[in-house]
Structures are given as structure tokens and as C-alpha cells.
């Protein structure tokens, strides 16, 4: 499968510029290894705080579990 970096960049909400930006598989692998989720899993206002823990994700979506 060929990486669609250019089109990924159009939807990338990450506020941090790094070598993984737009390369979703590498970004996801990195964040999961840090026990967190990438910015694209969060609304912009939360993503910009760099609080990307699983706990924060569940907190934001817990109403879906009820």
C-alpha cells in the first residue's frame, strides 16, 4: 500500500511539526508506544493541549458508552 501523505496532510490536526506528520501509520505506532493516541483522535481544542491519553479520550466519549 502506498502512503497518501499529501492527502493525509490536508486532514492532519497535529499542532507539532515532526517527521511523522502525514504518515499516519508511523504516527499511530509512535503514539501507541507512548500509551497515547495521536491528535487526530481528539477535537482541535484538546489536541492542542497535548493531553492525548487514553483516559482523556474515554472522558471525552464516555457519554457514548452509556
Image (cartoon, rainbow, N blue to C red):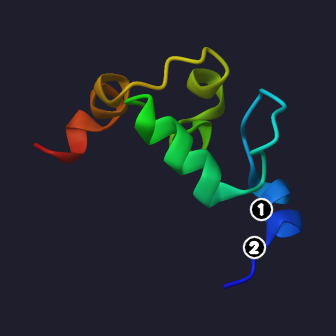
Q: Is residue 37 visible?
A: no
Any mark on residue 22, and which?
A: none
Residue 54 position (above or below residue 38): above
Q: For the view shown, which residue lies furthest in the bottom direction?
A: 1
Residue 34 position (above or below residue 37): above
Identify the residue at image location x=22%, y=38%: 63
Gap between marks 2 and 1 measured at Cα: 9 Å
Residue 64 position (above or below residue 16): below
Q: Secondary structure at mark 2?
A: loop
Asked if the residue under mark 1 is in contact with the one under mark 2, i.e. CB atoms within 8 Å, the reply is yes
Along the viewing direction, whichever of 55 and 62 lies nearer the viewer: 55
Q: According to the image, label 1 marks what residue?
A: 8
Identify the residue at image location x=29%, y=24%: 55
Relative placement, left or right, of 41 versus 50 is: left
What crowding class fits label 1: few (fewer than 14 Cα within 10 Å), some (14-19), or many (20 or more)?
A: some
Q: Is residue 61 visible?
A: yes
Q: For the view shown, which residue lies furthest in the right direction?
A: 6
Q: Position of residue 13 (x, y in %)?
A: 72, 41
Can you say which quadrant of the picture contains the N terminus? bottom right
Identify the residue at image location x=39%, y=24%: 53
Q: Position of residue 46 (x, y in %)?
A: 56, 23
Q: According to the image, label 2 marks what residue?
A: 3
Amino acid at each position: 500500500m502506498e502512503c497518501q501523505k499529501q492527502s493525509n496532510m490536508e486532514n492532519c490536526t497535529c499542532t507539532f511539526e515532526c517527521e511523522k506528520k502525514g504518515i499516519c501509520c508511523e504516527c499511530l505506532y509512535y503514539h501507541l508506544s507512548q500509551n497515547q493516541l495521536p491528535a487526530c483522535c481528539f477535537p482541535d481544542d484538546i489536541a492542542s493541549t497535548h493531553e492525548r491519553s487514553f483516559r482523556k479520550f474515554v472522558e471525552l466519549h464516555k457519554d457514548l458508552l452509556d
